[in-house]
Image: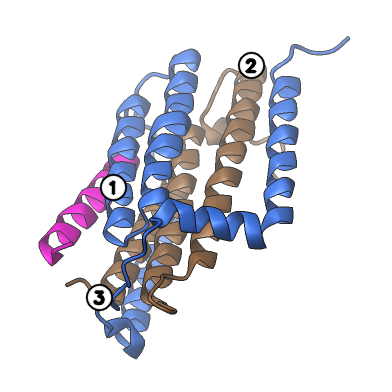
Chain colours: A blue, B brown
Amino acid sequence: MPAALFWIFACVMLIFGVMVIINRNPVSSALSLVVSFLGLAALYISLDAFFLGVIQILVYAGAVMVLFLFIIMLLDLKAERRRDFNLVTLFGGIVVVVLFVKVLFDVCYGFQHGNAVFPALQPNPHGDTWLVGMELFEQYKLPLQVVGVLVLVASVGVVLLSKREVK
Amino acid sequence: MATLNDYLLASGLLFTIGFAGVLLRRNIIIIYMALELMLNAANLSLVAFSRFHVQAGLPDYNAQVLVFFIITVAAAEVAVGLAVIVALYRAKQTTHIDDLNSLKF
C-alpha cells in the first residue's frame, strides 16, 4: 500500500477517535467509533492481515457497535448536558496524556529497528485466511476451546444479568 | 512506504485518545467506547509487529492468532459490560459516573 494511503487511513482513524470523546451525543460518538474501526481495518489490510481486517469490520464495526447503538437507544440517552468540570480530573488527565505522548515519541524515535521498511513476503498459494486457520487449529487448539467456554459463560452471564430480580 | 515506527505511532496515539476519553468523560457508555479504542490500539501494534517479523517469507502468525483471541474476548466483554450497564441503569436511572458513587471511599 502506498504511504499516502497509510497516512489517510491513520488520520481517519485518529480524527474519528477524537470525535468519539468530544461528541456530546452518545449516538454520534458510537457512529464515529464505527468509522474509526473502519480506518483501523484498512490499516490491518495494509499490513497484509486480510483475515483480521475482515473480522474487524464484521465483529467490531458490525456486531459490537450495533450492540452499543442498541443499548444507547434502549436507555434513550440524551446529549449530555454541560456540567461543571471537575478541575482536578481535567488537569490530571491533560498532564497524564501529554506525558504519555512525550514518552511515546521518545520510544518510537529511539527504536532503531522501527525504521525497517516492509520485509518482502513470498507469495503463497493458500492465502492469509488458510494460514491463520492452520496456525489456530494446529498450535492453539486448547486456547480456542477455552475461548469457546468463555463465550458460553459470557452469554449465560448476560442472560442472568438482564433478568429481573429473582425472588 | 510506511515504516514500523509509523504504525507504532498511530497505535500509540489511538491508545492515548482512548486513555484521555476514559479520564475526561463522565458518561459510562462513552468511557466503555474509549476502552474499546485502547484495546484496538494494542491490536494494531500486534499486527504491525507480526508483519515486520517475517520468517520464511511469511508474517508471524502467532501475533495474528493472539489478535483473533483478543477480538473474541473483547466481544464477550462488551456483551457482559453492556448488560451490567443496563442493570445499573435500571437500578439508578443514570449513566453519569458522578451519580454512581455508592462504592466510593
Q: Position of residue B66 (x, y in %)?
A: 56, 59
**From where the camera sits, is residue A101 visible?**
yes
Of residues B34 and B61, the one nearer the viewer is: B61
Which chain contains the residue that carries disc 1?
Answer: A
Q: Can you tell which quarter of the image residue A84 is in?
A: top left
Tag nearer the camera, 1 or 3: 3
Query: What's the residue type where badge 2 is placed?
Result: Arg
Residues packed near mark 1 inside 10 Å, few (<14), some (14 to 19) or many (20 plus): many
Asked whether residue B43 is drawn in magenta, I would say no
Q: Residues within 10 Å of mark 2 (few under 14, many from 20)?
A: few
Q: CA distance from mark 1 to mark 3?
A: 24 Å
Q: CA distance from mark 2 to mark 3?
A: 49 Å
Q: Residue at x 59, y 56 (%)?
A: A136
Which structural element holds mark 3? loop
Q: On the image, which quarter does residue B77 sit in?
A: top right
Instruction: Give the magenta-colored segment's residue range.
Output: A1-21
Label 1 sits on residue: A18
**Residue in the foreground of this view, choosing between A152 and B81:** A152
Circle 3 crowding by C-alpha within 10 Å: few under 14, some 14–19, many from 20: some
Which chain letter goes with mark 2? B
Q: Which mark is residue B90?
A: 2
Q: Nearer the viewer, mark 2 or mark 1?
A: 1
Q: In the displayed structure, does residue B37 sit left or right of residue A135?
A: left
Q: Position of residue A47 (x, y in %)?
A: 31, 62
Give the main secondary structure of the magenta stretch. Answer: helix
Asked whether A9 falls inside the magenta stretch, the response is yes
Residue A53 in percent (x, y) is at 36, 48
Amino acid type, label 1: Val
